[in-house]
Image: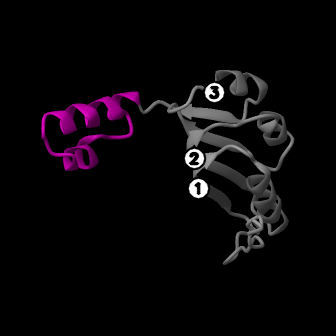
Amino acid sequence: PVLIPKEKPPITVVGDVGGRIAIIVDDIIDDVDSFLAAAETLKERGAYKIFVMATHGLLSSDAPRLIEESAIDEVVVTNTIPHEIQKLQCPKIKTVDISMILSEAIRRIHNGESMSYLFRNIGLDD
């Protein structure tokens, strides 16, 4: 059988983003082409700031340069994957340190303790 590459659906914006901050959320950012296309569409529709937030920031190849030259104002990723070199190439990339919450989650799982505690008691400062 011949494998046919998956086609991505066209980018659709639902609602009015004019004069608003747009936030694009995904689990992983590696190849940034779809993020750049979405940001361009949002900018054309009037969004005045565009943020991309992803759990894992692989940011392969020329992703930092493409982000730097794009309509994206900031990319926020966690430190699940090292990306210090990418941050040097693109000051738009910001990191959220989640090491403490991950270590607490692992400790709680190991000791059979409640995980819901993390959702109720871990604040923005933690």
Q: Residue at x 84, y 46 (%)?
A: 70
Q: Amino acid at mark 2?
A: Ala
Quick check: marks 2 and 1 in contact, CB under 8 Å? yes
| Range of magenta residues | 99-126
Please give the residue where the numbered disc 2 appears in the rendered image.
Answer: 54
Magenta stretch secondary structure, dominant: helix
Q: Which quarter of the rendered picture does the N terminus lie within?
A: bottom right
Residue 76 in the magenta stretch? The answer is: no
Q: Residues within 10 Å of mark 3 (few under 14, many from 20)?
A: some
- Secondary structure beneath label 1: strand
Please give the residue where the numbered disc 1 appears in the rendered image.
Answer: 25
Q: Amino acid at mark 3?
A: His
> In the depicted view, which residue is nearer to us: 121 or 38?
38
Mark 3 or 2 closer to N-term? Answer: 2
**In this picture, is 52 found above or below 44?**
above
Determine the CA span between mark 2 and mark 1.
6 Å
Which mark, residue 55? none
Mark 1 or 3 closer to N-term? Answer: 1
Q: Residues within 10 Å of mark 2 (few under 14, many from 20)?
A: some
Q: Toward which corner of the image does residue 63 lie, by quadrant?
A: top right
Q: Position of 87 compared to 101: left or right?
A: right
Q: Position of 6 compared to 84: left or right?
A: right
Which mark, residue 83? 3
> In the depicted view, which residue is nearer to us: 30 or 125?
30
Residue 118 in the magenta stretch? The answer is: yes
Find residue 46 and report its horizontal and vertical position in percent: 79, 66
Q: Residue at x 75, y 65 (%)?
A: 3
- Secondary structure beneath label 2: strand
Find residue 99 and report its horizontal and vertical position in percent: 40, 28
Q: Residue furthest left?
A: 112
Q: Residue at x 47, y 30 (%)?
A: 97
